[in-house]
Image: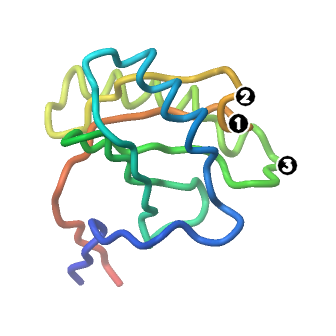
Amino acid sequence: MLTDFNATTPVRAGEELPIERLESYLKEHLPAVAGALSVEQFSHGHSNLTYLVRLGNLELVLRRPPFGNQVKSAHDMGREYRVLSKLHSIYSPAPRPFLFCDDASVLGEFFYVMERRHGLIYSGR
C-alpha cells in the first residue's frame, strides 16, 4: 500500500506550539533562516508529534513527545536525534537533523528539528 505521509493539516486542538518562543529559538540557533514562521502538523502518527515548520522558504520537521507524556524513555527525543544523526552520516537519504533542544522552557519538552524530505512510504497494510 502506498501512503502519502507528506500531507499536513492545521495543528490538532491541544497540540499547539508556543509560536513566539519557537520562532525566537529557531532564529537564534539557525541564524541563516529568515522570514515568517508557520506551523502545520503531519496528519499521520500520534506517538511522537511531528510538525511542518516553515521559516520563509525553509521547510523543517519538528518532532516532540506527546503532551502529557508520562513515559519519558518511550519518547526520548535525544536518543532519536542521536540515532538519526548517525544514520544520516552513513545513509544520505535519511533526513539531516539540524538541532536538538534540551531546554524544556521552549516547548515544554525536549525536541529536535530536521530537514524535510519528500517521498513515499510503502507499508504492508
Quick check: 26 left or right of 97?
A: right
State which mark lies toward you, 3 or 1. 1
Residue type beneath disc 3 = Gln
Q: Which residue is mark 1?
A: 109
- Disc number lying in front (2 or 3): 2
The residue identified by callout 3 is 70
Q: Quadrant of residue 123?
A: bottom left
Give the residue at x 53% y 66%: 11
The answer to whether residue 16 is above or below residue 105 is: below
The image quadrant of residue 91 is top left
Q: Residues within 10 Å of mark 3 (few under 14, many from 20)?
A: few
- The quarter of the picture where residue 86 lies is top left
| Nearest to N terminus: mark 2 or mark 1 | 2
User: Left or right of 32: which side holds 52?
Assistant: right
Display coloring? rainbow
Q: CA distance from mark 2 to mark 3?
A: 15 Å
Q: Which residue is mark 2?
A: 104
98 sits left or right of 14 in the view: left
In the image, is residue 26 above or below residue 63? Answer: above
The reply to whether the C-beta atoms of the residues labelled 2 and 1 are less than 8 Å apart is: yes
Question: Residue 30 or 76: which is nearer the viewer?
Answer: 30
Callout 1, which amino acid? Glu
Mark 3 or 1, nearer chain start:
3
Gap in angstroms between the C-alphas marked 2 and 1: 4 Å
